[in-house]
Image (cartoon, grey):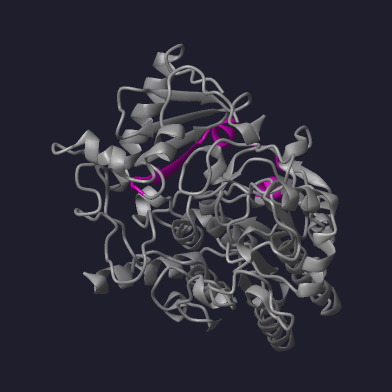
Amino acid sequence: MKKIMMKRAFWTVCWIFALAPRGLYAQDKPNIVLLFIDDWAWNGTPVAMDDAMNNSRMPVLQMPNVERLAREGMKFRNAYASPQCSPSRVCLQTGQSSPRNGFTVFMNDGRQEYYNEKQFKGFPVVSCISDMTIDADAVTIPEALKPLGYASAHIGKWHMRGDPGDEGYVLHDGDTSNTPGNTLPAEANQRLPDDLIDPKLMFSVTAKAIGFMEEQVKAGSPFYLQISHYAMHEGRECLPATREKYTRHSAVQAYYKKIGRTAETVKRKEDPAIWLGMGEDLDGRIGAVLDRIKELGIEENTYMIMVSDNGYRHSFLPGLTQPHHGAKWWVWQGGIRVPMIVKGPGIRAGSAFDGNVVNYDFLPTFVDWAGGKPESLKDIDGVSLAGYMAGDQPGEPFLNRNLYFHYPHYRDSLPHSAVVSGQRKLLHFYERPDIPMLFDLSKAK
Amino acid sequence: MNNIARQHAQEHQKLFNEMMVYFEKVGARMPKLNPDHDPEVYRQVKEYDQRVLWGPFEDRRPLEEDEK
């Protein structure tokens, strides 16, 4: 069976190659750099994702390079993802929705399925098992891009089990989870060590990613580079000097006061100065990539995408008004709406896109950018956004297409699913099929 | 935040049907109601309050403190 699936994947990539326009030589093809950020809310950046909503941005946090990316590129007001990291990563790699690819939840090693009869005995619903690897017959980003002349690298967090090399990445960090990014022991929750130099591995991840870019430029090869940061996941870490700066901010001081702590006594896991510092340090690494792209002379031929893996609810600064209901592990807007900015050739600087886009649109978009035919990708749910980024106006079929979210599990949440269709959103909770739920997204949070 | 499903029952039904047809088409795994559901056991788990707070609701949901 696996052999048949592999054969099918092989022929799919052959079709992508066969249907590609012949005039595109490797050196003409754009490079693609994905900055994939972990657990970062729609309102987690200083860039307002919705100019009409002041609480669509994070106050206090300084990220000049992310702001630069938004100034030079296009921001997406309505970008969606899965409600948890691993399912989101699989959607991104395969162009398939979670209900289709079957990888709907991640559980720790040692279990092949999430439904645990003992743990959930007596619960109203028998929740689902989940795939725990990428399907063998799914065509991943590097597999789709390789026949188009691309070398692909994945640096940082993987969290999909399996070997990234088996999915076509020529350079990678292996099957990494959150663990390597937590460079401090869990019990070190009182203070940051003064000698921390690589928080969340963001400096080493960036250095390795830049090394890959340099090699590909030298080789004259177009590349796909997936910089998959461990930040901004909890287990917060930053450079001590960056934390020090934020401890002095009045909003942070007010938070310390609220929880009865000081900058000296606050625990690491509750210190907003470390989370803010982590954001600013991450921004510096994003800037390092942007700068190196410019120095390498490939800026005009490189797409850069910055997006979060899932929604989140950052709730520590006084006066921070949540823009959404719910959080990670829920398909409420707070769990699935993410920040997204794209810069690259043909994308108007400072522009914004209002249509709904989703993580499973990336694969066909990348294939399109690479000169392939996204319509040749079989059994995917995403569509190419390349035309819209180049200025095409989306029609009704795109604007009102259905985006599906499926989280049939008990985590902190409930087994539930959702469909977003234009300005409408339906949620379905399997415990309560008697309560129909429909929302007008132009009014609902 | 208004749940408008009752006022737009046909629209809800249409979208719900589309979702279920899609789930069936792509072979999605679906949860099932548990014939051995025990409400008392369920109420004892630590996530219960959160599940009630963010679970399904009719009509209007009151804003939480950090949403005001």
Q: Which residues are magenta?
A: A387-410
Residue A442 is covered by the magenta coloring = no
Residue B20 rendering spot, x and y as whole percentages? 32, 34
Residue A408 is covered by the magenta coloring = yes
**Residue A416 left/right relative to A220:** left
Q: Nearer the viewer, residue B38 or A423?
A: B38
Residue A369 rendering spot, x and y as whole percentages? 64, 61
Which quarter of the image is occupied by the C terminus of chain A?
top right
**Residue A52 left/right relative to A233:** right
Residue A201 rendering spot, x and y as whole percentages? 64, 77
In the figure, A173 relative to A259: above or below?
below
Kindly identify the residue that appears in the image at 35 percent across and 23 percent down. Answer: A435
Residue A10 rendering spot, x and y as whole percentages? 38, 72
In the figure, A280 relative to B28: above or below?
below
Q: Nearer the viewer, residue A20 or A168?
A: A168
The image quadrant that residue B24 belongs to is top left
Q: Nearer the viewer, residue B21 or A431?
A: A431
- Let me know if residue A288 appears in the view: no
In the figure, A433 relative to A288: above or below?
above
Which quarter of the image is occupied by the N terminus of chain A?
bottom left
Kindly identify the residue that appears in the image at 55 percent across and 23 percent down. Answer: B62
- Let me know if residue A172 appears in the view: yes
